[in-house]
Amino acid sequence: MTAVRAHLLALFAGFAALAVVFVPLGLLLSDTFWTRALQGLPLTPEEARLLGFDPARFVDVATLAPAERRAVLDRTILLFVASVAVGTPFGLGLYYYQLWILQRVNQLLRLRLLDRLQELSLRFHAGSRIGDAIYRMYQDSAMVTELIRLLFITPVQTASGFLFGLVVVGLYDPWLALLLVCLWPPLLVLGRRFSRPLRVGFRTARERNSALTARIQETLAGVRVLKAYGAEAGAQARFEAESREAFAAAFAARSRFATYQVSLFWCAGVVLIAGAAVGALRTRGAAETFALVLGFHVWTLGLWNYFKLRLGAGAGHAQMPSTGSCTTRPRSPRRCTGSS
């Protein structure tokens, strides 16, 4: 982690800058499209400044004329296309930068694993299986990289995403923000209920796969001896038995993980449906909103559409479904969380 610490800080700063710039812009564009251009309501002062319109024609009026609505629609689409053209390369760059960081960690780990294996005694290597060492260097090193992503990158991204979504939803209505907060207790209960079975199940699955890799290496290395003594049938039977064990362990672990994800989905779905329904009723009644920082005073169609987006993002970040990772050390049990 020390070798990529500066890169991680730069990655987080990039994601934060992306959110600060484009999330408020998305809110304004959503409202100008759904509320102003399609319904003809006058612009807010902030929207007029963003689109470069004269407030006398677009703000201080009862409704927008067809020509003004068309102008708002054209500039909204133009600004949306421009923001996508600027934001997409930046977002993709951050994504590939994250991949580079993780692959850098993976590469450094493999080099250190090989160096460590060469330092171990002949007694250790005499009692160890070559296939197991290969599996640890090739597969478990990648799982350690995934574990770093889950323990450092994903928590920061999900926690900041949830808090940001909570703030945005709170600007609409504090009670709806409280609804989003109420999503946490059932998710914590589910996490506590499934955490240990998932760790044990995926640890067992990776151990079975490690043994299967060792069996493949030993069988291929001794294929000449097997053919010379006509022992192919016995080797095939042993391989099939270990392959079935590996499949059964992986299938059981992944089935349990699928049950966990479906449970998370249902909990988040209830909150999303309830929040969207309340927002729809507020929009229908033109209820007051607290989003005054951007010049909004009542619920509109554009605000409701953007509210659904941020509510869904907040609920998705609250779930934090880990795909899991495993780490291994020579002559020590594997420690796993999540899927393999």
Image: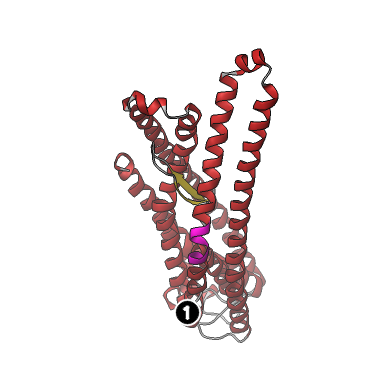
Displayed quadrant of residue 126: top left
Location of residue 109 with respect to 228 vertically, above or below: below
Q: Which residue is mark 1?
A: 178
> What residue is rendered at 42% in x and 29% in y?
127
> What residue is rendered at 41% in x and 62% in y?
160
- Tag 1 secondary structure: helix
Horizontal and vertical percent position of residue 46: 46, 70
Q: Nearer the viewer, residue 163 or 47?
A: 163
> What residue is rendered at 35% in x and 47% in y?
8
The N terminus - image quarter: top left
Q: Nearer the viewer, residue 290 or 218?
A: 218
**Residue 263 appears in the picture as rendered:** yes
Chief secondary structure of the magenta span?
A: helix
| Visual colour scheme | secondary structure
Q: Kindly identify the amino acid type of the residue bearing the numbered disc 1.
A: Leu
Residue 268 shown in magenta: no
Q: Which residues are magenta?
A: 191-197
Horizontal and vertical percent position of residue 312: 56, 67
